[in-house]
């Protein structure tokens, strides 16, 4: 197996393990027995669930009851900002890489004849430039 593929697979497994294990603990937390006896028993939880169902079936009871903009708004905003920065960075990198490639593609021969042999022309005014020139002598545009 290729070394790069092996490293990517190992990294994915380790990262997946770190993300899955904490969520398993949270998912089964409501069914564990209370350690000090202060929590609700299974029977009490069943009665509360029945009350929730009857309240949800009443006239005018819509939604889950959870506020859309709840108390954890700061965490939501932080995550949105982080995702925006990541996606914006990737888009900016593609934009910058595309701009460099586009400038190289614009360097074409002028009129089909290359008498002096350098083949570099100003992208703004079309004047031929030598290999040592960094700026156009006619208009001053960077070559």
Image (cartoon, rainbow, N blue to C red):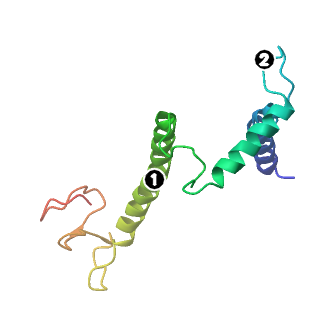
Badge 2 is on which residue?
38
Q: In this view, does 139 lie above or below 109?
A: above
For the residues bearing labels 2 and 1, Cβ distance under 8 angstroms: no
**What is the C-alpha distance between the residues marked 2 and 1?**
55 Å
Q: Residue 66 carries which label?
A: none
Q: How many marks?
A: 2
121 left or right of 69 in image: left
**Label 1 secondary element:** helix
Image quadrant of residue 91?
Answer: bottom left
SS at mark 2 in the image: loop
Residue 40 placement: quadrant: top right
Residue 80 appears at what percent x and percent y?
A: 48, 44
Packing grade of label 2 (10 A; few <14, some 14-19, many >=20) is: few
Where is residue 136 shown, x and y percent of the image? 18, 62
The reply, left or right, for residue 116 in relation to residue 64 is left
| Residue name at image x 23 percent, y 58 percent | 142
Point 31% across, 79% down: residue: 114
Q: Nearer the viewer, residue 110 or 114?
A: 110
| Residue 31 location, quadrant | top right
Q: Name the residue under label 1.
A: 93
User: As drawn, which residue projects farthest toward the left?
Assistant: 138
Coordinates of residue 54 in the picture (x, y in percent): 69, 49
């Amino acid at each position: 197996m290729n070394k790069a593929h092996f490293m990517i697979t190992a990294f994915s497994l380790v990262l997946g393990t770190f993300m899955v294990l904490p969520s398993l603990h949270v998912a089964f937390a409501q069914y564990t027995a209370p350690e000090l006896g202060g929590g609700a028993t299974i029977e009490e939880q069943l009665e509360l669930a029945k009350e929730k169902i009857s309240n949800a079936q009443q006239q005018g009871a819509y939604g889950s009851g959870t506020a859309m903009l709840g108390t954890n708004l700061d965490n939501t905003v932080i995550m949105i900002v982080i995702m925006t920065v990541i996606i914006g960075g990737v888009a900016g990198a593609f934009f910058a890489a595309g701009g460099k490639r586009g400038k190289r593609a614009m360097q074409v021969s002028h009129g089909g004849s290359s008498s002096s042999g350098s083949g570099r022309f100003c992208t703004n005014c079309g004047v031929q430039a030598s290999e040592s020139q960094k700026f156009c002598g006619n208009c001053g545009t960077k070559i």
